[in-house]
Image (spheres, grey):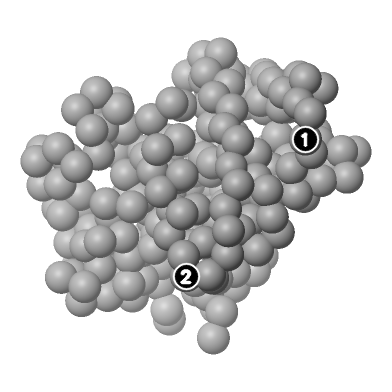
Amino acid sequence: MPTIGFLHTSPVHVPTFTALLAELAPAWQAIHQVDEPLLAEARQNGPDAPDILMQLQSHLTQLKEAGASQIVCTCSTIGGIAEQHGEALGLPVHRVDRPMAAQAVALGPILLVAALESTLAPTSALLADEAARQNRSLQVDTLACTEAWAFFEAGDPAGYHHAIANAIRTQLDHSATVPAAILLAQASMAGAADLLADLGIPVLSSPRSCVLAVTSP
């Protein structure tokens, strides 16, 4: 049975991706590895700090040895670094946000939204990479709704998603331009998309698009 190894920096992602895999690709099974301190260390020292690289290497190797045929890093802050380890590891390592980024670039001007400042730079770099791959121009406005993160840390997903949605509505109300797509940079933000369905603007999140991309023939 094909197996995806998921590397998370929060346990909240385990049921999300388990359910998505059961819905979208029931022939696949999942292995989950969670390292919560890794995100805090990456925010403090940078995702390419030597200690982060060592820990990433260890986690990815453990997932491979546990039977993973593909690996997904669900943390956008360290996803780009994890992705680079795939060749040395000998199996595909995916960053959760790449399929979403490819879709966003194809749509046009983007409002990139993150609840952590540390996510904006790697996601912006990913969008630039995807724009180059598609030979498209790129226009990105960014929004850091950092006040929402306290709800996530408090274990209040509803408050977290409402804070994100409210910040996006405020941004759009004060903006002279309308984006072609709103990109929710972190996998944990996906629940905010349902709260913005009335906008008439595609609100893209990473979990579903990533699982579909990784499990497609």
Residue 180 sits above or below residue 103 on the image:
above
Which residue is at the front of the view, 41 or 141?
A: 141
Which residue is at the front of the view, 66 or 78?
A: 78
Query: From where the camera sits, is residue 22 visible?
Result: no
Where residue 49 appears, as percent x and y from the top left, is 14, 37
Disc number for residue 189: none
Q: Of discs 1 and 2, which sits in the foreground?
A: 1
**The residue under label 2 is which amino acid type?**
Arg
What SS does tag 2 mark?
helix
Horizontal side of 180 relative to 149 (left or right) equals right
Residue found at x 63% / y 56%: 104
Horizontal side of 82 relative to 119 (left or right) equals left
According to the picture, the residue beneath numbered tag 1 turns out to be 177
Which residue is at the front of the view, 47 or 176?
A: 176
Gap in angstroms between the C-alphas marked 1 and 2: 26 Å
Indicate the quadrant where residue 156 lies: top right
Disc number for residue 133: 2
What SS does tag 1 mark?
loop
Where residue 113 appears, as percent x and y from the top left, is 59, 34
Toward the bottom, the furthest residue is 217
Residue found at x 9% / y 41%: 50
Lower position in the chain sequence, tag 1 or tag 2: 2
